[in-house]
Amino acid sequence: MKIEIEDIHILEAEQIFINGSKFDKEERIPFIKNLETCDLLAVPGSGKTTALMAKLYCLSKQLPFDDGSGILVLAHTNVAVDEIEKKLKKHCPNLFEYPNFVGTIQSFVNKFLANQACFEKYGSYIKRNEDDFIYKDILKKVKSKKGSAYWVVYNAAKSKYNKLDKDFILKYDYQINEEEAEKIILNLQNAKFLNTKLALNYDYKKIKDSNLSEFEKKIAIEFNKILDLNAKENSALFDVIKSFKYNEKNSYFTSERLNYNLQTSTNSGKELKEIFEESYNSGNLIFNDSFRLGNEYLCNYPQIKTILQKRFKYVFIDEMQDLEKFQIDIIDEIFFESDSSTIIQRIGDKNQSIYNNVREICDWITRQAKEPKKYKDLSLQNSLRLNKTIGKLVDCFVLERSGGYTVRGLFNFKNEIGISNEKLNAENEIPPHLILFTNETKHMLKDKFEYLIKDFKLDCLEIIKDKKSEKANFKIVAWNTVWDSEKKEDGKIRLIDVFPEYSKEAKAKKEYFTTLSKYLQLFDQEKKTLESARKSILNALTTVLYYQKIRFSISQLMDSIKTYRNDDGEEFYENFKQKLYLWSFDIAILKDYEVVFNSVKNFIETDFKYWFLIELTSESKEFISTFTIEIILEKEDIDETKLNFDIASVHSVKGQTLIATMYIETAYDKPVYETLKLKEASKNKSKKKQESKTHPLHFEPHSCEGSNAKQALKMMYVGFSRPTHLLCFAVLKENVKDDLEKFKNAGWKIDYDLAPINSNSQNVQE
């Protein structure tokens, strides 16, 4: 029996998902009714996820299907899956029951392929799939052995910082001028201690015996000492460890930090393999390992493909642009065979492929691009989030335009804001604001953003009453947030340099951390129940057991505690549950982090040790050793007259609709800032091409070339496409001072002055 979407169910979906408004007949209705294999390319704010929800709702009304098959809904992140469940489960609970499956690509591969493969190969089911936690454990083992594998990692870490340039010499001795510094470098190169890339070839004896001056010898020796210190830092070693990928088929490790494949036949390769396999044998897999095992399982048991094809009649994948090739390939390997009857629909925006690394070209190649005669791509090009002006600006940043992709902003203010017309542009919209700041005035950006929001009365909109907090409406975002393993460059700015209270780890909503202190503070505090706090405490306890080489899940931990009794036969379990409740309440509601930390630490060092008959290892002791404040306690010193902003990375706001956004340009790589990356890429390389070069910030479709510029285009495309009403772009004044007239003529409102704004001082605007 052929399944079709019924109009009555679309009407119901309109009531549920868009408050009784109508899905347009040009783009959304054709997609909702389409039940053929296709790809949907959708612009920011086009309502693609809402349209997918409507389709799933309509299909759920016809469950169970006559042939006993079901629906597979996949997304890239747990957050996206949670959002789908939150919006759909109460309206169509049958979608979340057998034979259907709603989850991440990772959870699907683990459940149906990798978990069994892991048991068959390593003797353990999957317990953890958390890269940072497992890589840190691998690094500890590499460091503790201090064998040949350690020196491979150390040398790779060292190479990142190995550049003895004139800047180092000038900082080392301020009496040296540039000409003298360049001469020292030339002498070191002539003596073969520096190569053409200025990397130091260090040999203490040869340097001491060389004809270099004593000062030149001292420079080389001191530079090597600094290299050594940098390379031995945990963050530098960790970056290298994270780069290793095990190619089991060909028995070697690959890494972008090495210029060769590390064969497992070498001492260092063999040692590293043993450490990785020890992790696998315990059921701890790195993210990519699930897909490696999943592919092996498909090769060993090809019949599983037929079983899965029969189980899932429809496969829907949201945020397709975030998938990497190995994830795309395994889904196609299962469902996209010539004789498969499974319908696959993939939904996303190629220009928003910024997950993990910002990719110039998205790994997702649409069906139409591969087989244009057989498949047709669908598109949603009307943005219901962006107004006409912001839509036009965002369209200038489009990198991939397959299928005539164009961003068309349709959002209309409808006289909802009580501001005078002279403050609006020709389209009756708030013009985008270019805000100029310096290193000395960067701390004033938040006040400036608040001033503009209040000036345009955006804090009085009706929509704010429907949202839980102002943070959901007004956000300050940046591409680069903190200085991780890199050394902070003098004078360069990232988000944490503007807002020292910003915590990258606190924003991440991770489940696993490296200290007890973080477990008790960095759990998901947005949820209003105690569940997140409870789960984080239990994860901390399983982490202690992990360091004791006891591999327990939370359920196994609870089951184990149930079995303990004291000499009088009293059960510990009820007492433990009471402790767990009080701890959860105290950190989630009272925010007594340090009090709970001391209580949990004492519990681990007493009762917990006794229950499991363990002596704490050095790793366990380090894990519970110190309490440090990880987040700002927002209850303290809140000024009720101030607006409540969220400060976040561009990555974290992807998919969100905001009322106002301030995007702050930040430092990364060369050229350093976004404005400089685009300016460099838009330079007229030759007089013949002079007229063809365009600049997206001047409301011109970009003609940028080069990796750095293309990455900047994608980040700014995502960041600029969040707000409905007000977009602010905060830039270092020195980066745009020569182009201000071009910005003004293009339609930007330029804010020159960041002086404190109060009743006695008026901000100067052009």
Image (spheres, rainbow, N blue to C red):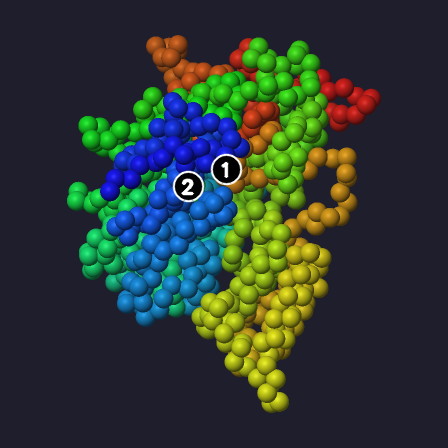
Q: Amino acid at mark 1?
A: Ile
Near-viewer residue (550 or 12): 12
Residue 171: in sight, yes or no?
no
Q: Position of residue 105 (x, y in %)?
A: 37, 49
Q: Splitting the image into 4 quarters, where does residue 370 fall? A: top left
- What residue is drawn where x is 34% and y is 10%? 688
**Residue sitting farthest toward the left:** 339
Q: Splitting the image into 4 quarters, where does residue 574 fall? A: bottom right
Q: Position of residue 615 (x, y in %)?
A: 54, 79
Residue neighbourhood size for the residue with mark 1, other residues' Cα within 10 Å, grouped as few (<14), some (14–19), many (≥20): some
Quadrant housing the N terminus = top left
Near-viewer residue (147 or 606): 606
Quadrant housing the C terminus = top right
Near-viewer residue (633 or 75): 75
Is residue 465 toward the left or the right of residue 654 in the image? right
Residue neighbourhood size for the residue with mark 2, other residues' Cα within 10 Å, grouped as few (<14), some (14–19), many (≥20): many
- What residue is drawn where x is 69% and y is 28%? 460
* Circle 1 residue: 16
**Residue sitting farthest toward the front:** 8
Q: Earlier in the sequence, mark 1 or mark 2?
A: 1
Q: Position of residue 34 (x, y in %)?
A: 32, 33
* SS of the residue under disc 2: helix
Q: Splitting the image into 4 quarters, where does residue 137 fall? A: bottom left
- What residue is drawn where x is 33% and y is 28%? 378
Label tally = 2
Q: Amino acid at mark 2?
A: Tyr
* Circle 2 residue: 57
Dots 1, 2 in contact, CB < 8 A? yes
